[in-house]
Image (cartoon, helix red, strand yellow):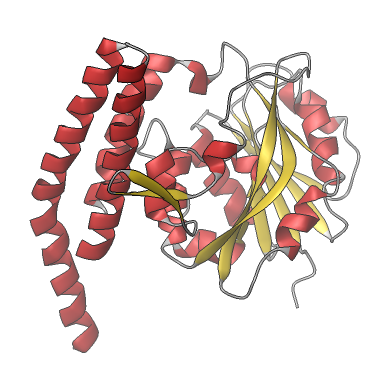
Amino acid sequence: MNRVGLSIVIPAHNVQETIEHTIHSALSSSHRPLEVIVVNDGSSDQTAARVALVHDPRVSVVTRAHAGGPAVARNEGADHAQGEFVTFLDGDDLIVPGTLDRLIDAFSPRDVVSMGKFIAVNEHDLALDIGTWSTFQLQPMVRRGRRWEPCALNSESILSRLVTPPPGAIVLRREVVRAVGGYRCDIARSEDLEFLVRVLGQGSAVLVDENVLRYRRTPSQRSQATRQRRWGRFRTLMVIMESSPSPHELLARGRGIVSHHRERAQLSRQTRQWWPALRSLGAVFFFWIWLVVCSPRVLARAVGNLRITRS
């Protein structure tokens, strides 16, 4: 039996102001035996020195000479993880004490991932109003005709919303993280969305209706660069569709992505935001075309896998 129940991987790049608080929140996050793996991703500030101030045998450090980005750091931390479960906590976020236990307790034998909700805070740890992202939009829904219907957490519902909790509000089975190969390091934006879509192909998921994370948002964050984030996510959605393992999954992913942009176009028209509405409609047509382009490749891949299985 594995001695470590939970591994918390913290990718850390130039987070000297917050890393100590983040580590202490990780250490108080669970009553289960846990380990905290800090991946110092080529930091040029005092991050390493601040980590060294935390004297706890449960904390280990992996040092990278050069910054590789969040995906690389998370994968390296996962390679060192020994727990049955693993979560990836950004170096400026805070886990609400004890809440990861409730995420783990929510697992059924078929579940591969458990997600919680979160509270957005600023650099002074004061709550921010970010609309319905952390609450209503996390509820799994799919579009059927002109109606939205509740459903299970799956690739279509995730892509219909294009909203996922921050990595620190998600607990995964470690064996599944390794089975899917971790995060893709060739994706510049929304790599956590692409990773979660692949994870959901391994089993079911559960959503816990509880705030488990204080998610820090600052203007300098990589996720706050709106234009770069928009185009980076656009390219990631193309990758998600093209890498579908079967025609059925391709259709589900394409339907989810198109549903999201249809909804965005409708909301923009209602508020008379014509340019965002046109942009979203353009995305709808683009992804329908991309669905047609991807279909022969996905079908050929599925047939090839079937032949290999039979042989």
Q: Quadrant of the N terminus?
A: bottom right
Q: Is 96 situated left or right of 76 in this image?
A: right
Q: Quadrant of the C terminus?
A: bottom left
Q: Is 62 situated left or right of 131 in this image?
A: right
Locate residue 261: give its quadrant: top left
| Residue 105 location (% of width, % of height) | 75, 64
Q: Residue at x 10, y 49 (%)?
A: 292
| Residue 82 location (% of width, % of height) | 69, 62
| Residue 217 location (% of width, % of height) | 63, 20
Q: Residue at x 74, y 18 (%)?
A: 46
Is residue 268 visible in the rendered image? The answer is: yes
> Is residue 136 positioned above or below 79 on the image?
above
Q: Residue at x 55, y 61 (%)?
A: 205
Locate residue 285: give its quadrant: top left
Could you say which is closer to the camera, residue 177 or residue 207?
207
> Is residue 194 positioned above or below 299 on the image?
above
| Residue 241 location (% of width, % of height) | 25, 48
Q: Is 114 situated left or right of 142 in this image?
A: right
Could you say which is closer to the camera, residue 236 or residue 151?
151
